[in-house]
Image: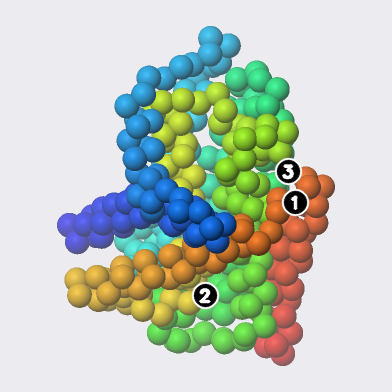
């Protein structure tokens, strides 16, 4: 019992500490590719500290939804990250079908963020909320199908079981085509769910092109800090899914301190590598128009669906 609690606590601490670093690394890569020096990779930590120290300004037109949303968003995202194996394949908080729980925990945070954008009563908040609703309705089915495609190879919808069997190559079906299609689909979903280019631009200051940023324009102080931290956690969660579901090599399969330390180091390398890839993509491509975003997300859904279909075809 104590060992399980320590593992859960260490996983939570790792996710909370590493998530701002990933955001800073992406910004640093973009700056270097644009021939700029850019801020250091630790800048997001200073930004969060600064926001926590600032006072909160809340409009008199808002309800309890506006003030409760940052806490709900942060708690749901952190809880979802505890269900995903980070440095140990068998996490204590695992159960059958927990992949669906992860999806709906993230969906709950998005739902309340959409409500908060509408609750403020501003034009930009409502516009961002409506756009976020469109994106979320298209990304979540693709996300579930892409993870299910890998889950079929392990015969389970439990994330820990999928990662554990894949890491040990135990009782799994290794079919490269479905895995590749599912990986590409989940990567596109990652870009959309975390508000990255080409779906959204987290560094934009043009209100008419905003999606995520438009919903949080009314937030300040510790509320904005929690929203930004939750956004970084969500990015890290998706990168962890990409790295540990499709390539779980190096993750600890036993709860031994030495193996878990090695698994933590390997996980840092993998998510940092994916962060560099995202930084390169954001430097190479421009933001898509809104009606083109649905086409891109449609491709992700089709790829994830084909991954499931191909799994059954190749099994015959």
Decide which of 207, 246 is in the foreground and name it: 207
Mark 1–mark 3 distance (CA, rounded to whole Å): 15 Å
Q: Is residue 76 visible?
A: no
Is 281 placed left or right of 309 in the picture?
left
Name above or below for residue 153 compared with residue 203. below
- Secondary structure beneath dot 2 equals helix
Foreground mark, 2 or 1, reads 1
- Secondary structure beneath dot 3 equals helix
Q: Which residue is mark 2?
A: 246
Residue in the image at 68% along x and 27% along y:
124
Mark 3–mark 2 distance (CA, rounded to whole Å): 27 Å
Q: Position of residue 94 (x, y in %)?
A: 39, 61
Is 269 placed left or right of 278 in the picture?
left
Check the picture and name the quadrant holding the C terminus. bottom right
Q: Position of residue 262 (x, y in %)?
A: 27, 74
- Secondary structure beneath dot 1 equals loop
Coloring basis for residues? rainbow
Q: Would you identify the image quadrant in which residue 150 lies?
A: bottom right
Check the picture and name the quadrant holding the N terminus. bottom left
What label sits on residue 199 in the rendered view?
Answer: none
Residue in the image at 32% along x and 35% along y:
49
Q: Residue furthest top?
A: 60
Q: Position of residue 301 (x, y in %)?
A: 73, 62
What label sits on residue 134 in the rendered view?
Answer: 3
Decide which of 42, 59 is in the foreground and name it: 42
Q: Position of residue 303 (x, y in %)?
A: 73, 69
What label sits on residue 288 in the rendered view?
Answer: 1
Query: How many residues crowd around disc 2 within 10 Å: few (fewer than 14), some, or many (20 or more)?
Result: some
Q: Earlier in the sequence, mark 1 or mark 3?
A: 3
Mark 2–mark 1 distance (CA, rounded to whole Å): 28 Å
Query: How many residues crowd around disc 1 within 10 Å: few (fewer than 14), some, or many (20 or more)?
Result: some
Residue in the image at 57% along x and 43% along y:
203
């Amino acid at each position: 019992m104590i060992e399980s609690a320590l593992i859960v606590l260490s996983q939570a601490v790792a996710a909370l500490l590493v998530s701002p670093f990933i955001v800073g690394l992406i910004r640093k890569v973009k700056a270097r590719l644009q021939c700029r020096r850019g801020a250091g990779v630790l800048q997001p930590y200073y930004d969060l500290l600064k926001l926590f120290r600032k006072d909160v300004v809340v409009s008199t037109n808002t309800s309890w939804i506006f003030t409760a949303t940052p806490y709900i968003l942060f708690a749901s995202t952190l809880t979802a990250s505890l269900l995903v194996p980070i440095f140990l394949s068998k996490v204590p908080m695992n159960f059958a079908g927990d992949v669906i729980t992860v999806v709906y925990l993230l969906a709950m945070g998005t739902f309340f963020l959409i409500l908060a954008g509408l609750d403020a009563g501003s034009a930009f908040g409502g516009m961002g909320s409506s756009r976020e609703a469109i994106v979320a309705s298209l990304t979540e089915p693709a996300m579930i199908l892409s993870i299910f495609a890998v889950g079929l190879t392990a015969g389970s919808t439990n994330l820990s079981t999928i990662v554990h069997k894949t890491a040990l190559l135990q009782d799994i079906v290794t079919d490269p085509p479905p895995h590749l299609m599912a990986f590409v689909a989940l990567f596109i979903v990652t870009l959309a769910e975390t508000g990255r280019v080409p779906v959204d631009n987290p560094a934009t200051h043009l209100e008419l092109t905003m999606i995520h940023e438009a919903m949080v324009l009314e937030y300040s102080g510790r509320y904005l800090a929690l929203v930004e931290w939750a956004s970084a956690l969500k990015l890290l969660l998706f990168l962890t899914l990409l790295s540990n579901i499709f390539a779980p090599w190096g993750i600890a399969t036993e709860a031994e301190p030495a193996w878990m330390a090695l698994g933590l180091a390997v996980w840092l390398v993998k998510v940092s590598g994916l962060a560099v890839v995202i930084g390169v993509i954001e430097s190479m491509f421009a933001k898509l128009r809104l009606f083109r975003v649905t086409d891109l997300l449609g491709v992700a859904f089709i790829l994830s669906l084909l991954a499931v279909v191909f799994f059954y075809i190749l099994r015959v």
